[in-house]
Amino acid sequence: MPTEEEVEEQLREVIDPELDINIVDLGLVREIGIEDDRVEILMTLTTPGCPLHSVFDEMVRQEVGGLPDVNEVDVELTFEPRWTPEEMSDEARNEIGHLPGMAGGF
């Protein structure tokens, strides 16, 4: 059975293709639940209409499912509370500040 830290490390491999920042540093991962060989991820998106929903779902399942002793990965989306830029890590905020057209960040 993996630890929460091991799952979080795998989730850092899930990169937002538009921002080139992982979903943990973006603050999209709300909860990680582990029970035996099953991992549950509760996450959000930056907006409810984010077109990357299915991309993130597949990437999360692939990365977390690659951990030893994980046989099932459930991904659930929530928009309550809504995501805000304050949920990003300092590293993510700094990175976004360096993107063209994003000088002020979010």
Image: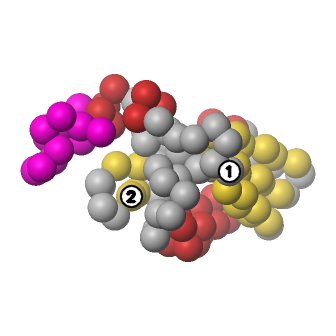
Residue 49, image x and y in percent? 50, 64
**Residue at left offset 77%, top offset 54%:** 39
Question: What residue sits right under mark 1 in the picture?
Answer: 78
Q: Looking at the picture, which amino acid does disc 1 mark? A: Thr
Q: Looking at the picture, which amino acid does disc 2 mark? A: Asp
Give the mark count: 2
Magenta residue span: 94-106
Q: Residue furthest right?
A: 36
Few, some or many residues within 10 Å of mark 2 (<14, 14–19, 20+): some
The verdict on residue 95 being magenta is yes
Which of these two is toward me, 61 or 48? 48
Question: What residue sits right under mark 2 in the picture?
Answer: 16
11 in relation to 81, above or below: below
Residue 70, image x and y in percent? 76, 60
Q: Main secondary structure of the magenta part?
A: loop
Quick check: 14 left or right of 99? right
Can you see residue 84?
yes
State how the image is colored.
Answer: secondary structure
Quick check: 99 left or right of 60? left
Q: Quadrant of residue 106?
A: top left
The verdict on residue 10 being magenta is no
8 in relation to 39, above or below: above
